[in-house]
Image: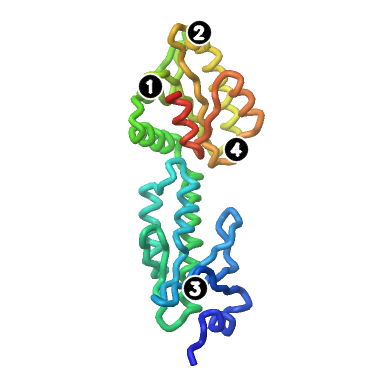
Amino acid sequence: MTTSPCQLIADTIGQLYTCSEVNGLVRIRTPYLYPDGDVIDLFLKPETQTLTDLGETLRWLDLQTFRQSLSKKQEWFLQDIQVTYGVELYEGMLLVRVQNNLAEAITRLAQGAIAASNLWLLNRTRLASTVNDDLADLLEERQIPYERDIKVVGRSARSWSMDFQTRHPRRSTLIKVLSTGNRGAANSKVNNAVAAWVDLNQLQLTTEPLHFISLFDDSLDVWSSSHLSQLAEFSNICYLSQPEELIEQLVT
């Protein structure tokens, strides 16, 4: 008599895992969590004896990045994770082919999913220049002309550094990117941006006014509501985690 997958799990690792059948698949709820606290679920396809996360791990990881795609560094580490845990990658899904030991396959895939989800930490240590590279790629994908690292002279005759100036038939926009992992530096960056927008205010009063955007790297938990309110008085606020909203601001 063939033992069902759920019975095998109950007999081996059942104290930590729960098992149920969902739409022809066997869902295995693990005791492991993604970094945001969501439970890692794995799914067994009985007819092929394939264990998979149904793409949830990489889907979660993509959502943690500005461009909603992996960086080259993350892709390199993901390849290393595949080798380390014996995990395959197919159409965005992590999977393991079950041989004789279902419990071992479950543990291996769960550990691979944890390691892959932890690649989001690479985003927290990225430099502002890397953020700007990602933004440049996004603008090119959307075919929005731009200049990068420009100087703009204000009323005080001071020259201010702007990360981007975009040019669209409907409007031109100056973008100041705010990205740092240091709370002390966050205050300095906000103060500098406020001073720049105030000094450049006359550019919003011309017949073809410039649009101002303060773009926050909100993958880093260093910004306070005070920072946002200060800059909202002089510019529009956008977030790296919401690229579609940024694009809408640039073209409408």
Q: CA distance from mark 3 to mark 2?
A: 62 Å
The three-letter amino acid code for the residue at tag 1 is His
Which mark is first along the chain, 2 or 3?
Answer: 3
CA separation, marks 3 and 4?
37 Å
Q: Mark 3 Cα within 10 Å, few/some/many (few <14, many 20+)?
A: many
Residue linked to disc 4: 222
x and y percentages locating residue 85 in the rendered image: 42, 69
Rate crowding at label 4 as few (under 14), some (14 to 19) or many (20 or more) other CA atoms within 10 Å. Answer: some
Which residue is found at the position 44% from the left and 59% from the top?
Answer: 55
Residue plotted at (55% across, 27% down):
237
Q: Check contact, mark 1 vs mark 2: CB within 8 A.
A: no
Residue 72 in the figure: left or right of residue 126: left
Q: Measuring 41% from the left and 73% from the top, which residue is drawn there?
A: 50
Marks 2, 4: nearer the viewer: 2
Instruction: Please state which amino acid type lies under the numbered disc 2.
Output: Leu
Q: Nearer the viewer, mark 1 or mark 2?
A: 1
Quarter of the image that includes the C terminus: top left
Which of discs 4 and 1 lies nearer the camera? The answer is 1
Judged from the image, the secondary structure of the residue bearing numbered disc 3 is helix
Amino acid type at image mark 4: Val
- Residue behind mark 1: 168
The x, y position of residue 75, in whole percent, is 37, 53
**Residue at the disc numbered 3:** 106
Tell me which numbered mark, 1 or 3, is placed earlier along the sequence. 3
Q: Mark 4 and mark 1: span between their CA atoms?
A: 32 Å
* Upstream in sequence: badge 2 or badge 4: 2
First in sequence: mark 1 or mark 2?
A: 1
Residue 142 versus residue 17 in the image, above or below: above
Residue 73 position within the rendered picture, expressed as x and y whole percent measured from the top left: 38, 50
Residue 82 quadrant? bottom left
Q: Are marks 2 and 4 in contact (CB under 8 Å)?
A: no
Give the alpha-carbon distance from disc 2 to disc 4, as whole Å. 33 Å
